Each structure stands twice: as structure tokens, then as C-alpha cells.
Image (spheres, grey):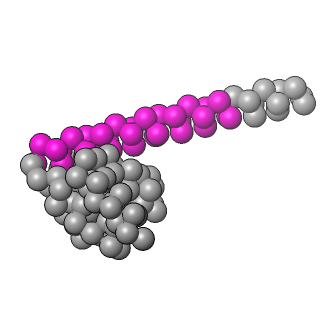
Amino acid sequence: MDELKYLANWVKEQHAQEYILTWLLNQPGLWWSDGEAYQAALQKSGKLLREYVQKNQSGDLFQGIAEKIVDDESWNEVAESLAKIISVYQQELVRLQDFSRRKNNQNILKKI
């Protein structure tokens, strides 16, 4: 357990932004809801994102990670990255739906 705590502290010191972005991407309902993290990403608001993370961080390993990102610019970068990921995800989802729709239409035409 001590090794895990040491690793967690090292991550907090060295890779706080990446760690928080990964954590945000794993939050249930991020992609589909109008929740706080989603709204913060759409608005590219580091302030709202920081508030969400601070309010929802839990567990010994995660506690305090939000305090490692101190300047507003870094929080804005995380919010902007999250917005880009959500945008690409939504574009790909539409592309897959279009592909599926065309494939279904072709199958229907073959049966006629």
C-alpha cells in the first residue's frame, strides 16, 4: 500500500492535468448528460471544471489532486482538451450511425 501511495503522490506532482483528464473521461454519464463536467467542457471553463473536480474527488489516492493544478490557464487547458475529446466522440458517433443507416438501406434494397 505504501508503494501505491508513493506512486499516487508522484502522479499528483508530475502529471496532474493528465490524471484529472483521464478521471473526467471515466465519469459515468459524461457523454450523455448535461452534467457539470459536460457543461464545463462545452463552455471551456476551467473554473467550472475545477469546482466539479474538487466537489467530486474522493478516496485517499485522489484526494488533493485538484490542488496540484494551481493556475487558471492549466484548468482551461484541461477543459478545452475535454471539449475536443467530446466533439470528436460525437462526430464519430454520427459517422457510425450514418454508416449503419446506409448499410441497412442497402440490405433493404437487396431484399426488394
> As drawn, is 6 to the left or to the right of 75?
right
Using residue 94 as the reference point, say whether residue 83 is left or right of it: left
Q: Is the magenta stretch mostly helix, strand or loop?
A: helix
* Image spot of residue 105 (x, y percent): 75, 30
Q: Residue at x 83, y 27 (%)?
A: 109
In the rendered image, which quarter contains the C terminus?
top right
| Viewer can see residue 24 | no
Place residue 65 in its image quadrant.
bottom left
| Point 42% across, 71% down: residue | 1
Image height of 88 relative to 109, above or below? below
Q: Which residue is drawn at 47% across and 34% down?
A: 91
Q: 77 left or right of 7?
A: left
Considering every residue shown, the one lying at the far bottom of the view is 59
Q: Is residue 18 visible?
A: yes
Residue 18 on the magenta span: no
Does the magenta run of residues contain 98?
Answer: yes
Q: Position of residue 35 (x, y in %)?
A: 34, 62
Nearest the eye: 90 or 11: 11
Query: What residue do we see at 60% from left, 34% from top?
Result: 96
Residue segment shown in magenta = 72-101
- Return the residue found at the far right: 111
| Nearer to the camera, 11 or 31 | 11
For the residue pair 110 and 88, the one nearer the viewer reads as 88
